[in-house]
Image (spheres, rainbow, N blue to C red):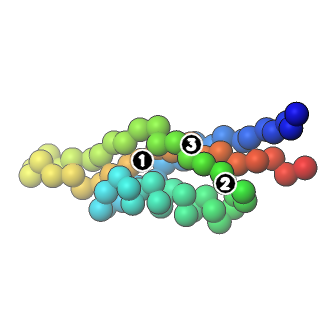
Amino acid sequence: MSESIANIVELVGSSDKGWEEAVEVALQDATKTIRGITGLEVVSKTAVVDPNNGRVTKYHATIKLAFGIER
């Protein structure tokens, strides 16, 4: 039996273009300091709306990243 342990971190990415890009922003920034990322979960998606025109001005994606512990 193989034992494994994963670390989980929660991050929020943001984008002017959409939620998918917000996820990518968070993931790409994480890869600068975290090695061995094995998966992610999109926890929530939110947006900022301009009250004057009713349009989305900023997209936010909260994600959880999983990565192994180096031994």
- Residue 34 lies, in percent from the top left, at 70, 58
**Residue bearing the label numbered 1:** 61
Label annotation for residue 64: 3
Q: Residue at x 27, y 47 (%)?
A: 48
Of 67 and 25, which appears nearest the observer? 67
In the picture, measured across the screen, residue 20 lies left or right of residue 55, that is right
Contact (CB < 8 A) between labels 3 and 1?
A: no
Question: Furthest residue to the top?
Answer: 1
Q: Nearer the viewer, mark 3 or mark 2?
A: 2
Of 36 and 25, which appears nearest the observer? 36
Q: Is residue 40 above or below residue 32?
A: above
- Residue 69 lies, in percent from the top left, at 81, 47
- Residue 21 lies, in percent from the top left, at 39, 60
Question: Furthest residue to the front?
Answer: 1
Label annotation for residue 37: 2
Q: Residues within 10 Å of mark 3 (few under 14, many from 20)?
A: some
Mark 3 lies on a secondary structure that is strand
Q: Quadrant of the N terminus?
A: top right
The mark that comes first in sequence, 3 or 2, is: 2
Q: Residues within 10 Å of mark 1 (few under 14, many from 20)?
A: many
Of 15 and 50, which appears nearest the observer? 15
